[in-house]
Amino acid sequence: MWHHYLSRHLWAVLKFRSDDVMVMTFPKCGTTWMQEIVWTMLHNPNLDNPKGNEAIWFRSQDISLDMHMDAEAMGGKLWNPIMEKFEKMCPGGRVEDGVSLQILEATAGPRVIKCHYPFSLLPPEMLQSAKVVYVTRNPKDMMVSFYWFWKDCSIFEYRGNFENCVRQLMNGTTLFTPYWPHVKEAWQKRHDSNVKFVYYEDLKADIMLELRKLNEFLGTRLCEEKLEAVAQHTSFSSMKRKGDNHEKDFFGETKFNKNETKASFYRKGTTGDWKHQFSPELQEEVDSWIEENVAGTDICLKWALGQ
């Protein structure tokens, strides 16, 4: 399915520009947070851009979303609420031609593009022009976030328990897996001048330090006062407050299960929540999986194990 879709739609249509910024992650690793940070730094440093009140999903197109919408690939069943919204925005109005891609093509630069594809599925020439901000996260926290998103998001109709979800992610039987090649491919490109490799945990530990690094990488030249404003504007509490109002517009009425009154796209935004979710036996199993996959690399084991 991956290669069929990519060859049929994406690389035949998408042409990268010199001012493009790609926010790339494995799902549930801080994608939306980084999208908002980058978009704000590029388009709303004074916090007065009226588009800043729109949902980030409309301001920053997800080039991996069209695969879900592809009638041949998914039957269009799960994504009807989203498809309807994007079709109204689409210049061509044809789902089969890639709705997000058509919207993206008509978007003025600098474009902030979201992507869950690994580097191996992206054209090599992309880094000759576009910049990539790659965010990764402790895989155990990723698994927790992944599970609750599947469980609470009614359009997925997920019936598995937490251990089922964890093992699916480890076995590479879910969308966008396998996880480790995704991270390792980005890690290998971290020294490229057009790649910024970011740990979610570093963002949480010292947001201002990471914003200064992004400021230099993006060439936005924002002063310290504006960076502090960006930090406040993109804080979890601020994004959750705004995001809760956008969810219905983006996903439709059936987005979150009604019996989960606290369910939200923005759940906790913390690090280390896995410690409250994993049994000792499951933690041992996942730690072995992490150690096996990190072995022979210089990826920080402390980060991956979250200890």
Image (cartoon, grey):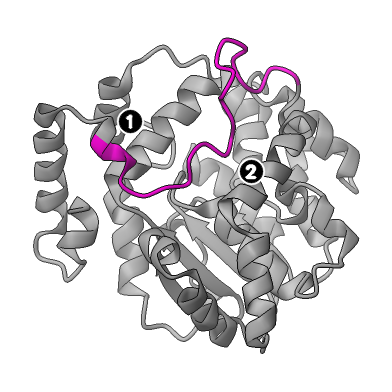
Any magenta on residue 304?
A: no
The numbered dot on residue 240 is 2
Count up the numbered dots.
2
For the residue pair 138 and 260, the one nearer the viewer reads as 260
The residue drawn where x is 63% and y is 27% is 72
In the rendered view, tell whether residue 157 sits above or below residue 228. Answer: above
In what element is the residue under mark 2? helix
Q: Main secondary structure of the magenta part?
A: loop
- Which residue was labeled with disc 1? 173
Q: Residues within 10 Å of mark 2 (few under 14, many from 20)?
A: some
Amino acid at dot 2: Lys
Image position, residue 176 (x, y; %): 43, 42
The magenta segment: 253-275
Tell me the distance, in whole angstroms, between the alpha carbons under discs 1 and 2: 30 Å
Q: Is residue 241 left or right of residue 131?
A: right
Image position, residue 239 (x, y; %): 65, 49
For the residue pair 238 and 125, the one nearer the viewer reads as 238
Q: Is residue 203 left or right of residue 31?
A: left
In the rendered view, tell whether residue 225 sits above or below residue 175. Answer: below
Image position, residue 197 (x, y; %): 41, 71
The residue drawn where x is 57% and y is 39% is 266
Among numbered discs 1 and 2, the one appearing first in the sequence: 1
Any magenta on residue 268?
A: yes
For the residue pair 105 and 298, the one nearer the viewer reads as 298
